[in-house]
Amino acid sequence: MSAYNKMIVAIDLTEEAPQVLLKAKAMSEAHNATLVLVHVVEPVGYAYGGDIPMDLTELQDQLDKAAREQLSAYGDQYGVDKVNQIVTVGRPESEIHRLVKEQEADLVIVGSHGRKGFQLLLGSTANGVLHGTECDVLAIRIR
């Protein structure tokens, strides 16, 4: 019996995502675990503080569609079933915490840039996921 049965790998769809996906795939194979790909699209209103008096629905829909297409491409490339590809909208840490419970995951894999100084004080998604999740978290160092 493996220590891990279901792993959530949270990726940001940048050019660095494959570094995280390669190691996540290897971990899932080593543990014979199900891999769930997750990308969280932050609400467009967050970026503008909600101060812009216009409807951002169309822009949000475009971002969501692009994220689904990119996640699907990664899913195909790394052999992850469509049912285990999740794009959701919200704050990354909160959505990942929610999905850990919903998916009954026992490991979350995230990429980390290893920030230092002022950026460290502001926190990172990896740090936010670590503090508040109910399962193990593996941070993959992005180079």
Image: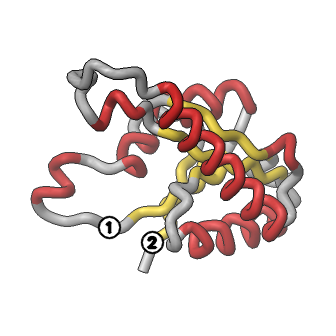
Instruction: Give the x, y percent position of residue 33.
Output: 83, 54
Separation (CA) of disc 1 from disc 2: 7 Å
| Pointer 2 residue | 141
Question: Callout 2 environment at 10 Å: few (<14), some (14 to 19), or many (20+)?
Answer: few
Task: Pick whichever, 25 or 133, lies toward us.
Answer: 25
Labelled disc at residue 114: 1
- Left-right relation of 54 to 10: left
- Left-right relation of 126 to 7: left
Instruction: Give the x, y percent position of residue 16.
Output: 51, 72
Question: What residue is rendered at 73% in x and 63% in y?
Answer: 74
Assess whether mark 2 and mark 1 are in contact (beta carbons under 8 angstroms): yes
Amino acid type, label 1: Gly
**Quarter-of-image position of residue 103:** top right
Residue farthest bottom in this picture: 143
Badge 2 marks a residue whose secondary structure is strand
* Relative height, residue 15 to residue 118 (above, below): below
**Quarter-of-image position of residue 142:** bottom left
Question: What residue is rendered at 57% in x and 41% in y?
Answer: 62
